[in-house]
Image: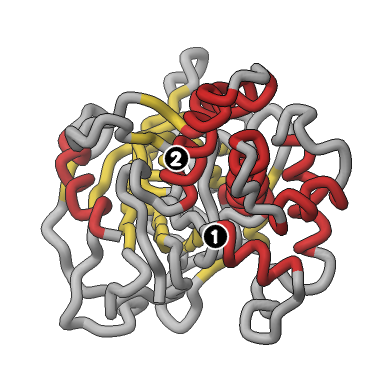
């Protein structure tokens, strides 16, 4: 999770500014600072009456192994947001809603409020799908007025911090401000074909990964990802068990089966810390330390190579998939413990 430490540089962007880290009552350990901290203002105005309201937004982001993290989850980040009503014009009004705007609510594994200290508690913290996907903290009308500060609202996500927006609603008016939100793909931790073969065998020391119906869901999604190379789950699993020593096509299909399962695991269970990779995960194909392709692009190359009927292209497809599954070409591949 070393990437987050470089993201403090993003805090100087317009809309919010970095703060000096300070211990708050919700920190597990006052000796540790958040990995990122910042604040900004949201101004809401009514052009007809001239009324206005100003709110201060504070946010902190914690790595999973940060000893101050109030809600640590392995392989994920914890985002904590607070809002304070700092100024208003002649018409008093109360804050009714805070939204952390997201590209997809599937980025969020958990959301809620931290209790045990001073602040106004929201009546609910929920994820909301639809055209404005977000984590929504709703407050009782009249409860949140000038000078009040909310209890900390937290969001747990495997997605890394990126620049985003928070929206505040004082019915019928609203305004937005900048903050770090879950936006950047999680770090990849692909599994090799041996792991997936053992999981298909329900081997005792790996069967706790993707338990219950999860492995069946992975196989169904992997068949879809394979672009027609595998016709059904049985075909996919069969490919895991043939190494194809005398067939370039079989070797390529063997590695494609594992790659498709890795992508399916990232798609369906992005918070898992055993096997996950994403279509947008960046790859370094020439070993210069710079990304020059993505998993999705190379997946297309692999499928085309297998379909080509040419042994050389099928061998190339095998090597591309093998390098991804072993993490050789994956930028910032990690192994969680």
Q: How is the image coloured?
A: secondary structure
Q: Is residue 3 left or right of residue 138?
A: left
Q: Secondary structure at mark 2?
A: strand
Question: Residue drawn at (22%, 36%), measured in percent from left and top?
Answer: 287
**Looking at the picture, how far across and down is residue 214, in whole percent?**
77, 63
Residue 26 in the image: x percent, y percent? Answer: 36, 77
Q: Examine the image and state in which quarter residue 5 appears.
A: bottom left
Q: Position of residue 38 (x, y in %)?
A: 24, 49
Left or right of 267? Residue 59 is left
Residue 36 sits in which quadrant? Answer: bottom left
Residue located at (33% from left, 58% from top): 61
Residue 9 % position (x, y): 15, 41
Tag 1 secondary structure: loop
Residue at 64%, 62% (x, y): give it: 196
The tag on residue 317 is none
Q: CA distance from mark 1 to mark 2?
A: 20 Å
Residue carrying label 1? 275
């Amino acid at each position: 999770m070393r990437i987050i430490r470089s993201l403090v540089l993003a805090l100087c962007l317009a809309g919010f500014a970095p703060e000096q880290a300070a211990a708050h009552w919700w920190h597990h350990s006052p000796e540790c600072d958040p990995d990122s901290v910042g604040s900004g203002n949201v101004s809401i105005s009514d052009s007809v009456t001239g009324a206005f309201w100003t709110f201060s937004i504070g946010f902190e982001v914690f790595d999973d192994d940060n000893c101050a993290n109030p809600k640590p989850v392995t392989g994920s980040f914890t985002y904590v947001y607070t809002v304070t009503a700092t100024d208003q014009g002649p018409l008093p009004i109360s804050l009714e809603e805070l939204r952390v705007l997201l590209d997809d609510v599937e980025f969020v594994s958990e959301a809620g409020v931290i209790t045990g200290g001073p602040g106004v508690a929201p009546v609910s913290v929920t994820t909301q799908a639809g055209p404005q996907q977000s984590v929504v903290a709703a407050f009782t009308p009249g409860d949140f007025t000038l000078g009040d500060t909310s209890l900390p609202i937290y969001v747990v996500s495997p997605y890394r911090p990126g620049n985003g927006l928070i929206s505040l609603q004082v019915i019928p008016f609203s305004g937005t401000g900048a903050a770090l939100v879950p936006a950047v793909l999680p770090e990849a931790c692909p599994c090799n074909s041996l792991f997936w073969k053992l999981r298909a065998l329900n081997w005792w020391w790996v069967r706790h990964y993707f338990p219950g119906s999860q492995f069946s869901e992975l196989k169904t999604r992997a068949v879809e990802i394979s672009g027609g190379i595998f016709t059904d789950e049985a075909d996919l699993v069969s490919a895991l068990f043939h190494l194809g020593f005398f067939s370039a096509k079989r070797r390529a299909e063997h590695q494609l089966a594992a790659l498709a399962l890795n992508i399916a695991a990232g798609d369906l269970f992005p918070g898992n810390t055993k096997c996950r990779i994403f279509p947008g995960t960046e790859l370094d194909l020439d070993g210069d330390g710079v990304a020059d392709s993505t998993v999705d692009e190379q997946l297309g190359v692999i499928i085309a190579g297998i379909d080509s009927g040419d042994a050389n292209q099928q061998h190339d497809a095998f090597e591309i998939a093998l390098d991804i599954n072993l993490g050789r070409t994956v930028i910032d591949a990690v192994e969680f413990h």
